[in-house]
Image (tube, rainbow, N blue to C red):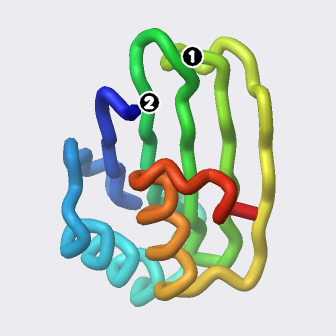
């Protein structure tokens, strides 16, 4: 079970325990904006102090990266998967699967 969930927008604005509307808002902002090499992604982190940290970063270019770390300090990268053809709908699905701990639904 996740002890904490944190959403970070492309502008670095953090939201703890985001709801579905928060996820949609951040993704809409990400995909609606012009290309911005300085702020290309938004990400969701889920974890606990004693267990692994899971991160899904979604990029305005349409790719996403799922990373599993050994701990909240990102001590060791245990898994990293890159996904292409990500849009608002599939990005939202990735983030909700991460929150709901449906890791098997994340490619």
Distance between the Cα atoms at labels 1 and 2? 8 Å
The mark found on residue 45 in the picture is none
**Residue 40 seen in the figure:** no
- As helix, strand or loop, the secondary structure at mark 1 comes to loop
Q: Residue at x 52, y 18 (%)?
A: 51
The mark found on residue 71 in the picture is 1
Binning the other alpha carbons within 10 Å of mark 2 as few (below 14), some (14 to 19) or many (20 upward) gives many
The N terminus: image quadrant:
top left
Judged left or right of residue 102, residue 42 is left
Judged left or right of residue 4, residue 52 is right
Binning the other alpha carbons within 10 Å of mark 1 as few (below 14), some (14 to 19) or many (20 upward) gives some
Judged left or right of residue 70, residue 26 is left
Q: Is residue 32 above or below residue 82?
A: below
The residue where tag 2 is placed is: 47
The percent coordinates of residue 82 (x first, y second) are 79, 59
Image quadrant assignment for residue 2: top left
The percent coordinates of residue 68 (x first, y second) are 67, 35
**Disc 1 vs disc 2: Cβ atoms closer than 8 Å?**
yes
The percent coordinates of residue 19 (x first, y second) are 20, 63
- As helix, strand or loop, the secondary structure at mark 2 comes to strand
């Amino acid at each position: 079970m996740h002890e904490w969930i944190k959403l970070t927008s492309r502008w670095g604005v953090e939201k703890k325990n985001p709801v579905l509307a928060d996820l949609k808002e951040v993704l809409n902002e990400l995909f609606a904006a012009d290309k911005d090499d300085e702020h290309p992604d938004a990400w969701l982190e889920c974890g606990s102090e004693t267990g692994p940290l899971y991160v899904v970063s979604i990029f305005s270019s349409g790719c996403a990266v799922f990373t599993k770390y050994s701990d909240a300090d990102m001590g060791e990268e245990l898994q990293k998967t890159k996904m292409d053809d990500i849009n608002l709908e599939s990005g939202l699905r990735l983030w909700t699967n991460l929150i709901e701990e449906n890791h098997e639904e994340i490619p």
